[in-house]
Amino acid sequence: MEGVVASVAYADGKRVGDVAIPDISEVLKKPDHFVWIGLHDPSPELLKQIKEEFGLHELAIEDAQAAHQRPKLEQYGDSIFVVLRPAIRAPGQEQVELGETHIFVGARYIVSIRHGATPSYGGVRTRCESTPALLAKGPGFVLYAIMDFVVDQYFPVIDALGDQLERLEDEIFSDDFDRQTVQRIYALKRNLVEVKRAVSPLVDVCNRLMRFDLPLIPDDTRPYFRDVYDHAIRINENVDTMRELLTGALEAHLSLTAVTQNDAMKKLAGWAAIIGVPTMVAGIYGMNFKFMPELEWRFGYPAVMAVMLGACGYLYYRFKRSGWL
Amino acid sequence: MEGVVASVAYADGKRVGDVAIPDISEVLKKPDHFVWIGLHDPSPELLKQIKEEFGLHELAIEDAQAAHQRPKLEQYGDSIFVVLRPAIRAPGQEQVELGETHIFVGARYIVSIRHGATPSYGGVRTRCESTPALLAKGPGFVLYAIMDFVVDQYFPVIDALGDQLERLEDEIFSDDFDRQTVQRIYALKRNLVEVKRAVSPLVDVCNRLMRFDLPLIPDDTRPYFRDVYDHAIRINENVDTMRELLTGALEAHLSLTAVTQNDAMKKLAGWAAIIGVPTMVAGIYGMNFKFMPELEWRFGYPAVMAVMLGACGYLYYRFKRSGWL
Amino acid sequence: MEGVVASVAYADGKRVGDVAIPDISEVLKKPDHFVWIGLHDPSPELLKQIKEEFGLHELAIEDAQAAHQRPKLEQYGDSIFVVLRPAIRAPGQEQVELGETHIFVGARYIVSIRHGATPSYGGVRTRCESTPALLAKGPGFVLYAIMDFVVDQYFPVIDALGDQLERLEDEIFSDDFDRQTVQRIYALKRNLVEVKRAVSPLVDVCNRLMRFDLPLIPDDTRPYFRDVYDHAIRINENVDTMRELLTGALEAHLSLTAVTQNDAMKKLAGWAAIIGVPTMVAGIYGMNFKFMPELEWRFGYPAVMAVMLGACGYLYYRFKRSGWL
Amino acid sequence: MEGVVASVAYADGKRVGDVAIPDISEVLKKPDHFVWIGLHDPSPELLKQIKEEFGLHELAIEDAQAAHQRPKLEQYGDSIFVVLRPAIRAPGQEQVELGETHIFVGARYIVSIRHGATPSYGGVRTRCESTPALLAKGPGFVLYAIMDFVVDQYFPVIDALGDQLERLEDEIFSDDFDRQTVQRIYALKRNLVEVKRAVSPLVDVCNRLMRFDLPLIPDDTRPYFRDVYDHAIRINENVDTMRELLTGALEAHLSLTAVTQNDAMKKLAGWAAIIGVPTMVAGIYGMNFKFMPELEWRFGYPAVMAVMLGACGYLYYRFKRSGWL
Amino acid sequence: MEGVVASVAYADGKRVGDVAIPDISEVLKKPDHFVWIGLHDPSPELLKQIKEEFGLHELAIEDAQAAHQRPKLEQYGDSIFVVLRPAIRAPGQEQVELGETHIFVGARYIVSIRHGATPSYGGVRTRCESTPALLAKGPGFVLYAIMDFVVDQYFPVIDALGDQLERLEDEIFSDDFDRQTVQRIYALKRNLVEVKRAVSPLVDVCNRLMRFDLPLIPDDTRPYFRDVYDHAIRINENVDTMRELLTGALEAHLSLTAVTQNDAMKKLAGWAAIIGVPTMVAGIYGMNFKFMPELEWRFGYPAVMAVMLGACGYLYYRFKRSGWL
């Protein structure tokens, strides 16, 4: 069916087989069975079917349709609705992209809905099926597996942003910076702000899952959610650290620009003096007064040149010593 | 009556008909009926009538009269008083305007009072009447419908502010900025601060409505208030993100101005040297000493010109290489 | 008596009559009576008398004597001690002044002590006496009336500060700023910080009064304290907003100063080049070489002048186009 | 004994007499007696003796030995251990010094240990002995008296820092600032940060003492600790205010420096033009072209001088009008 | 065995002897015995053995394998898992390095796993064995001893960072700063941010250990954890103080750079005027007008020279007086 990536029934941690959407109620009549339905950009009709099948709340379905949600966890009676925002970063590209995933979890079903460029959860399914003992814990464990996958995908993104920050630092302190540096600092800041917005509500989502008193989260899956929580906290801390360092880098950049300008100004002043003094002296001996005895002197010219050179040399020495040149 | 936009009785989610203000008590004697009164800039007398009809608290009525309140939720016995600040943004205008709405909600009535340029709630009424199943939940659902409408109106405002921010970023990094850029950054900041002040107390209002243990908020309307809460949080987050980015943009602007000045200073210094050196040399050979052998040389002039050109060329090359020109 | 502004007994919301301090115990023997004593800069002896009359705590009396307290609420057994800091702003003056008021409230008495330039509470008394139904609630209502009066006095102060901020913004963006602008920004910041210090503890005081479980605050006066609380929150928010905008204004000022300097620098560089080039050319033709063929040319002078004008014109055009002039 | 400043037994608020350390247990056998031991830089042996006498915890003794603690309150069974950091500011000196005091309080004893330059508590002892009614409350009241003394010593320090801040403000806005101003701003910041670190944990210590449910803090001493708490809050607020103003002052300083530089730059540019134009004109008429008709004119020289003066005058007028000169 | 540093059984606070990993279960059958196993970079197989021996949780073992955790405390049933990040600072090196240690604590065992450059816990073991009374408290006390050791190692690191900060302050205010200063400020900031990340979660870990209600933390070891908590707080506060001062230092640096530039600009302007004026005058008398009476004067040349010197002297005096030179 259009938009359905997979629809599989599981029992006792083992795959029972594919199920067509209309046959789900039939399957769920058997005890200990649950279904895991994976959707990708589903049509409104499909969503409506799913909604009726599992009795999902209208508002959650509206959210799942609309996308552009922030990560959150909402409880509707015995079922929960989770929104995640997986991060993807195309190699060679600086811009981080944030996808969106909606997950409905009930005691006997889990429905994951991917939007746009979100990566496929095929790997998660394979991994779950390879550990039947864990998969037997039911939809709660599948939820963990998806969240773990999503959170783990943040690490390479964070590392890439960290590398970018280090390159920017090198650029700033190697005195090789220009207008682009500032633009790159700002672009990195934007990326960090966006990743932060995607990750920081996750911490709260995991925290609540760790403490949830619902049959669909068995007690022994709690340490798993704590693990995801821990990762989310680490990513969060990393982003905060980078933001703080970036602010520091921008301040350092401003200070260095000021220092550079100081140096340029001092050089300008120094050389202006070294060029200005002989020009002034030459101007004086370029005057057309009738009676200027020096002009008649046999060695007037070399003497004046010597004076000029001496003045320049002295200025050069003075400026050099005080660090202006 | 002057100031009364609509005054309608509902029963079982269906419109029973218009009611004159004085007949309200009559209508409310029938079970399961409730009235929804919409006012616009009501006169003090009208408000007094309403107050007596429903037994509203004097202080809330004072607030409703005075306007210039911040969004809030106050409980008076079994009824509540809500203040909202809808945002409107005239197309083509940068300035966001904030209207004001006061809502009194009791078990059997809801009174909404619009002030100034606040948009009409006619659409909300139509939408409510089109879903009788929901309208049957009573005044609590109407309150939700109004809040949902007000909060949803923030999204286009936020989008417009976001566009403005992006235009400012382009302006800053395209090196096309001037005094106006700074003024626009500040104006956007002012807008954001004002929107923030209107939205951020809303989060708290929704949060309390979600948890309120009052008969006028039936249990099954809670997910609806959570939905509004969720939207308010998103708007809030958007505003915070924009404020942070705007601060970054202003810092970037300052850094870029400093870099630009550096560049100008270096260019100034470079060209000053390139013009200053030949001027100095020319000054020397403009001196009127009797005995200046070079002046007599046949090729003195071309030689000096060559020296000048050589010096200028060398300086030009040096400055170019070190990026000063 | 020196320092006693008024000392009046009330019963059932009606003024019974003035009471001399020593006769108070006599009056309080009658049921439902309470006294309201207004003092202004009382002498230590008077305070001692009051202390003994009502059994006030030594430490509170010390505070009332010393002034220079921060707004606070302290409970001593069944009575409370409140410190308020009313704001006054002389018309035409930029500086906000903060007075100080101490209030002792017990079940049967209220003692208000004004210090320094604090405005008189005569108006509060008149207003209370004009609403006997409310005054009958006892000293708790009088406390509300005084707090309401004090908090309402902040609004004109806040408005005046807001006007000042807007004038500063105009000054900054009209490019008409100078050293005084920075000083005025700083002075406004100082004022805001001081008003903030006076208002922000008030929020907490009102909050505690709203929740207090004391017989002297009857249940039905709670909405009144919530009203004062609401006003205090609004003033607080206003001050915070202004502080944030002021910070933004100072940053904008710095950015604009940098932009202005950039413009000046570019103008300087441009005109230096336009003056420098003809000076250099003139210098060259001012050299005294014997063999300079151009000097002999019939149209050498006009040609050189044309070259100079051309160069200047070209530079002017280039600088103009790139926005340096 | 070396390091013992005083060791006195009290009963019923009256001084019973000095007690040698080894005789303490003897004294404490009598009911209602308590001892107050004041130590100054005690030797490890003395501390060990004290420890054994009162059964103090090893870790607290280690802390008392080591000094360099932060203000804190620790409860060990029925006794408490308090660390305070009194502030001293030598007159005429800008640097604030922070001493250290450790206090052990049990039901029947109080041991105060001063380190380094901490002022003597002799005055506290005298004051306590002069109010037997209060001293009779036992060690808890003595603890209050010491804390009150320590906190009150902060006020002159705070006032002196406030004066320093005002002098700095005057310096900044009187345009009389230089490198030293920045250094002084930074030094004041350092002082404020250090005072803050000493005072801000005190607020928490007092808060906990106000709420402590220990026999050694009788109920009726609670208002006294609330008083100290109140003072600590006020000092804390003062420091925060000063830190905020100092930040504002530094920003104002930066802005003013930029404005000053702008003014200097504009002056430089203006005068450069006024000097540069006649220089250029003079250069032109200094050229050696054979055919320059102006040179032959009878009034060429005065005419050119008039042109020069006119140009300079015009420039001066233009620059003056636009505020550059 | 590869990776096992020590594996020792203790009973009643006394060392019973080394135990091979496979014999542990045998030893633990004896009452009151516990084992302390120290590992260093263990192989996955070794970890697996340990895991099976003590029934550790798979997720904790994964963490212990992977390293790169943040300090944390996790409870798995009756056992806990602690991650610490000891700091090491090679003498003469500015960069702080953070190692990593994982600790599993159960009622009868403690397993400490060091990673990378983390210092050996041999000293901790010796110290524990030298106080049998304390060691008899079991694995909880050993945990304290390790944490105390790790936290105490931060103090020299903090002191070194403090020295670095003071050297930077001296550099900034001695006017001896250059590009390297900014880079050093940034490097220190990076170090502080990293130390902060390692220490600040420690405060929470200690806080929870102080309150834990687990048999493996006996009541009388709580004051010990409070001691570690206190140290962690102090280190945290130190880092925060340094960060605040560093921010102030960077701002001061920026302000000083601006002041320096101002001074350079003023010097440049002053000397430019002093050189420019005689150049202009000389240019005037270098004009070739036929009729320039001054040129013919006998004392024209000395008179002009006097005028030039006078102008320069006057300018010098004026600039000196207004502080430009």
Image: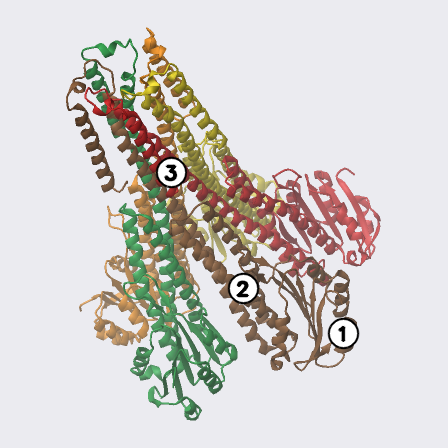
Chain colours: A red, B yellow, C orange, D green, E brown
Quarter of the C terminus of chain A within the rendering: top left
Quarter of the N terminus of chain A within the rendering: top right
Q: Amino acid at mark 3?
A: Lys
> Viewer-proximal residue, C71 or D233?
D233
SS at mark 3?
Answer: helix
Residue D273 in view of the camera: no
Residue carrying label 2: E154
Task: Tell me, for residue C62, which label it has, or none.
Answer: none
Q: Are marks 3 and 2 on the same chain?
A: no
Q: Residue at x 25, y 74 (%)?
A: C48
Q: Chain of mark 2?
A: E
SS at mark 1?
Answer: helix
> Viewer-proximal residue, B305 or C262?
B305
The answer to which image quadrant residue C70 occupies is bottom left
Kindly report the distance in space between the C-alpha atoms of the residues bearing marks 1 and 2: 34 Å
Q: Chain of mark 1?
A: E
